[in-house]
Amino acid sequence: SGILSSGARFKLAEGISPLPRDRVWISGGRTGVSALGTAAGFLMGVQINGTSQAAIDLGDDGPTPNDPDDADTGPNGFFNLPTLTSSTVGSTIIEGTYDGLASTKLYLQFYANSACHASGFGEAQEVLGVDSITTDANGDATFVTTFSRSLTPGDLISATATDSSGVTSELSGCVAVADFAVAATPDSIAFSGQSQGTFEISVSSVAGDFNRDVTLSCPDAPSGVSCSFSPATVTPLDGEVTSTLTVSVSSPALTAGTARPGIGGGGGGSSPGLSENGWGSSPGLLMTAGLVALVILLLGLLGTAPRLGAEPSRRVRYLRLLLPLIAVVLAVACESDSTAPPSDQPVTYSFSVRGTSGGVTHDAPVSVTVQP
């Protein structure tokens, strides 16, 4: 053992809130701290790593199970340890329960670990922080503790409990820091006209049981594309849950003269994708016809122009009145021909399905192709 005490009261580290002033590091060995007989020890801020049996061992006989209401006796009173039920990414949120002496204030010390013992009980590799709880008249308490530090999915959390007299428990069992992932099946669909299409959106736990709500949305869906989720909020505890996404396209997500991101026949969502559909690739038939008509009118005007000083003929006067109207028609034809999609070309809308839980977000790309 790193430290072995038998029948003596010992104290490692000073202070409780917000963290001990002193730190003790113990590495390697069978146990980090072992207590025998009537030994009683206050252990907070002690960082223990790399032991083969237990980081803290009351009785020097391996992990000691909790007993109801902590009525047993022995080293440190075989003080009951906290039970951790979940831990999630983002601002690290740790949930758990405690069963011990009635109406007792306790300090919970939390640790982050890269690995735990084969028994499932924790090391004390890195101190995360301290929280306090008070048991009820039955000796029970629940807790939800949040630390601003974000851990990596799969990191392992353990904890000890210490009462106000300075008696500390063994380390709890480990719980993995869990994350979630979002996926769409299929990731692309095609339908015709003003129809609707559906995706199956799966939200699954990663590296542990993610027990917090995940809200689904389509934050970057183009104009004219609407998303409806059923249900809109899911909780992927114990594996994977699904939601049905219904996508409706009410109108082309394009305004005159502007290609919007996420739309394009080439699927790239930019003006080159629009060109692949033929939008804006040439002046078009309307513009060509208009130019031919203008040339014919101008030739007619020149052929019937009056001599200098003579009054313009009726035909010339009519042509002068028609020229502004012809110019307006040509301008409209050019504008509409360069921006409107050909009626026989498919339009693809690409966007993301987003899952949000607290400050954590994950996206899944999807695309919808509308056939003529």
Image (cartoon, rainbow, N blue to C red):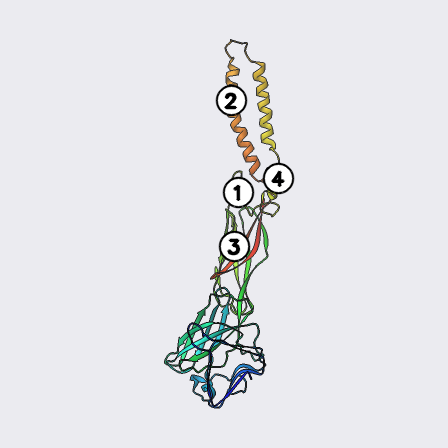
For marks 1 and 2, the one nearer the N-term is: 1
- Of badges 1 and 2, nearer the viewer stands 1
Q: Is residue 259 above or below residue 13?
A: above
User: Crowding near pointer 2: few (<14 within 10 Å), some, many (20+)?
Assistant: few
What is the spatial separation of the Cα atoms under label 4 and label 2, in whole angstroms? 32 Å
Which x, y percent locates residue 127?
50, 73
What is the quadrant of the N terminus in the image?
Answer: bottom right
What is the spatial separation of the Cα atoms under label 3 and label 4, in whole angstroms? 29 Å
What is the quadrant of the C terminus in the image?
Answer: top right
Mark 4 lies on residue: 278
The residue shown at (54%, 35%) is 336
Q: Is residue 263 above or below residue 51?
A: above
Instruction: Identify which amino acid the numbered label 1 is placed on.
Output: Leu
Mark 1 lies on residue: 254
The residue shown at (49%, 20%) is 321
For marks 3 and 1, the one nearer the N-term is: 3
Instruction: Identify which amino acid the numbered label 4 is placed on.
Output: Gly
Per the image, label 2 sits on a secondary structure element best described as helix
Circle on res. 246 = 3
Instruction: Identify which amino acid the numbered label 2 is placed on.
Output: Leu
- Of 46 and 167, the residue lying toward us: 46
Per the image, label 1 sits on a secondary structure element best described as loop
For marks 2 and 3, the one nearer the N-term is: 3
Circle on res. 322 = 2
